[in-house]
Amino acid sequence: MNNQLVSICIPTYNGAKFLQESLDSVNAQSYKNIEVIISDDNSTDKTLEICTKFKENTQFPVSIYTHQPQGIGANWNHCIEKANGVYIKFLFQDDILYDTCIEEMVEIYKKYPEIGLVASKRDFIIDINMKSEQTEIWIKKYKDLQRDYELSDNSMYYLTNTIFGEESFLDTHRNKIGEPSCVMFRKDITKSVGLFDIKLKQILDYEYWYRILKNKPVIVINKPLVAFRIHENQATNINKTTEINDYNIYHTILHKEYYRYLHDSLKKSLDNEFSKRNILKKYVFKKYKSLKAKIEKWLR
């Protein structure tokens, strides 16, 4: 009970540049009852070579799986499905766990077994090619994701689904918890909330955290236990420069799944938004029917 297995899940794809540093941080963990689950989406660089060498030189179980690419969410889910641990601890191929990260997160679960997820603050590692005024602005905006909330004590935030009811819930930043490398949760929670939504590309992490938070409290440890790397090839930056963008459906998810929890002003705003959408849909459908009738008449 006091030394339960933690599965460190590492979804990979062409991550050779920073992967060794991430794996070294796994080796340095003070908590020793761990396994590593690596799910690779057909990397073409030296990712699998690095992973294989890592497996050969560790004292804990390391499983390496190849995965047919179906999007990042599918690879995350594949990691979870292969995991044997009581807890799932994500580590992305370019991030780093601090030495006591897993130990401190497991301790939180011992003290607060009712929670659905534990997270921590994070530091930033800025790749030299990303050092710019724009990056500094981003960090200033997103560094403290819990700034709207009060500390339960000096060591943590204890968040419940009441945060959905705050008027500021949609202000500034959407993710109130953190990136996947910052969190740990019990594997068995997937039985009640499911897995990551593979249709989503950008918001699938905090959409999942909120699914958990809707049912169980979340604790955020008030100190960085991971380092999140900002570099030009990370998925977030790539998605921003392509047509992959699902931020525009975030309000649809809130309206469908969280409406009853939201502040009245946010409900009103969403109602107005969806009312306009419905009017537009009816207009487009009416035009479609009219055009279809004209075409059918012309073809007779």
Image (cartoon, rainbow, N blue to C red):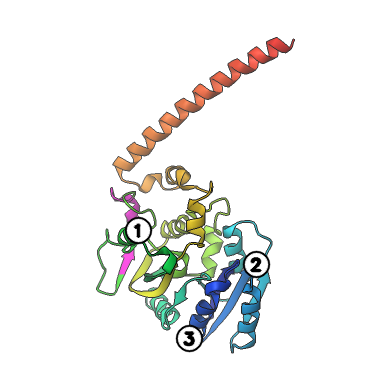
Query: Vertical placement of 53 versus 286: above or below?
Result: below
CB within 8 Å, label 3 to label 2: no
Query: Vertical placement of 285 versus 156: above or below?
Result: above
Give the alpha-carbon distance from disc 3 to disc 2, as whole Å.
Answer: 26 Å
- Quickly name the residue at label 3: 28
Residue segment shown in magenta: 157-169
| Percent x, y of residue 270 | 38, 38
Q: What residue do we see at 70% from left, 10% from top?
A: 298
| Percent x, y of residue 59 | 59, 89
Using residue 30 as the reference point, say whether residue 150 is left or right of it: left
Using residue 52 as the reference point, say whether residue 193 is left or right of it: left
Query: Vertical placement of 298 versus 259: above or below?
Result: above
Q: Amino acid at mark 2?
A: Ser
Give the alpha-carbon distance from disc 1 to disc 2, as whole Å.
Answer: 29 Å
Q: Amino acid at mark 1?
A: Trp
> In the rendered structure, which disc, 1 or 3, sits on the residue that comes first in sequence?
3
- Quickly name the residue at label 1: 138
